[in-house]
Image (cartoon, rainbow, N blue to C red):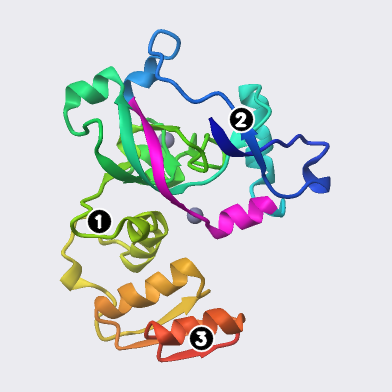
């Protein structure tokens, strides 16, 4: 299959740039070889988004140790990049099939953190900071490819009658913004938001910050101040409803 890969080593990390369009073996589900595949699915990305993280890796300014460590641990030469996606399920592992939550042909998005489920952080409900985490498109083959293999527990069922597909592909960064706007709110009612009637500062008005402005407003913030140096992002922050944007 065609994929955008990051073929790096410890010695060429700082002298290379960008990704490589390559023909690589497509992922398969093989439960005899890897029993964990029972809990995974194969998908074909429909739309994938480009995140600031992708840009950071492109210029070799992000995730150096994480990527090199996991490549060495897995004895691999590359990871496939990309973690924001809307994708169609093409095959289910046996346990996923049995659980009945997902079907072949179903359209889903995905949470980008692949977690172990047994470490202290996972048990405390903080799977996004799992001690053994892999990140899709960083330390786990990602979605800038014709096929991707993901654990079913990171999939996010998506109803295309309610959201346009190209927008649905941005649910992962949107989820980050929801997370920052809802501290200590797991399981509670959104109308009890701590934002209601408050002045809220949003530090950084890139994609997630812009989403955070919209969410904070929807959750009742009375005044929203963006903190952002980039003139383009400043203008966008004002256009999505920030009352004021100041330099950091
Ligand atoms: Zn991202
Ligand atoms: Zn964990």
For residue 221, which numbered disc appears in the image? none
The correct choice, above or below, for 160 with respect to 194 in the image is above
Horizontal side, residue 39 vs residue 145: left or right: left
Residue 188 position within the rendered picture, expressed as x and y whole percent measured from the top left: 18, 60
Mark 3, ligand 1, within 8 Å: the answer is: no
Q: Quadrant of residue 21?
A: top right
Give whichever of discs 3 and 1 has the lower sequence position.
Answer: 1
Residue 204 position within the rendered picture, expressed as x and y whole percent measured from the top left: 53, 74
For residue 186, which numbered disc appears in the image? 1
For residue 235, which numbered disc appears in the image? 3
Q: Secondary structure at mark 2?
A: strand
Label 3 and label 1: CA atoms lie apart by 32 Å
The crowd level at tag 3 (other Cα within 10 Å; few <14, some 14-19, many 20+) is: some
Q: Residue at x 59, y 53 (%)?
A: 54
Stretch of the chain drawn in magenta: 40-58
For discs 1 and 2, the disc positioned in front in the rendered view:
2
Q: Secondary structure at mark 3?
A: helix
For discs 3 and 2, the disc positioned in front in the rendered view:
2
Magenta stretch holds residue 52: yes
Give whichever of discs 3 and 2 has the lower sequence position.
Answer: 2
Taking the view exactly as shown, the residue that stands out farthest to the top is 32
Q: Residue at x 41, y 42 (%)?
A: 45
Give whichever of discs 1 and 2 has the lower sequence position.
Answer: 2
Horizontal side, residue 61 vs residue 201: left or right: right
Q: Residue at x 61, y 23 (%)?
A: 74
Label 1 and label 2: CA atoms lie apart by 42 Å
Q: Residue at x 57, y 81 (%)?
A: 232
Label 3 and label 2: CA atoms lie apart by 40 Å
The residue beneath circle 2 is 23
Front-most of residues 245 and 239: 239
Residue 197 position within the rendered picture, expressed as x and y whole percent measured from the top left: 26, 86
The crowd level at tag 1 (other Cα within 10 Å; few <14, some 14-19, many 20+) is: few
């Amino acid at each position: 299959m065609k994929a955008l890969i990051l073929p790096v080593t410890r010695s060429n990390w700082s002298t290379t740039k960008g990704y490589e369009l390559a023909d690589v073996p497509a992922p398969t589900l093989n439960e005899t070889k890897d029993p964990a595949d029972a809990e995974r699915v194969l998908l074909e990305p429909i739309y994938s988004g480009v995140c600031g993280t992708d840009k950071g890796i492109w210029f070799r300014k992000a995730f150096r140790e994480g990527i090199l460590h996991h490549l060495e641990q897995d004895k691999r030469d590359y990871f496939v990049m990309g973690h924001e996606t809307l994708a169609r399920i093409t095959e289910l592992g046996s346990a996923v099939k049995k659980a009945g939550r997902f079907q072949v042909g179903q359209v889903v998005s995905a949470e980008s953190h692949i977690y172990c489920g047994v470490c202290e952080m996972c048990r405390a409900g903080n799977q996004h900071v799992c001690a053994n985490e892999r990140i899709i498109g960083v330390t786990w083959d990602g979605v800038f490819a014709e096929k991707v293999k993901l654990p079913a527990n990171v999939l996010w069922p998506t109803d295309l009658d309610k959201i346009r597909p190209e927008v649905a592909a941005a649910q992962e960064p949107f989820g980050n913004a929801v997370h920052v706007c809802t501290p200590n709110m797991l399981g509670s009612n959104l109308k009890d938001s701590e934002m209601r009637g408050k002045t809220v500062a949003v530090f950084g008005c890139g994609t997630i910050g812009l989403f955070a402005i919209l969410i904070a407003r929807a959750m009742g913030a009375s005044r929203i101040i963006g903190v952002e140096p980039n003139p383009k992002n400043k203008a966008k922050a004002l256009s999505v409803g920030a009352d004021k944007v100041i330099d950091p």
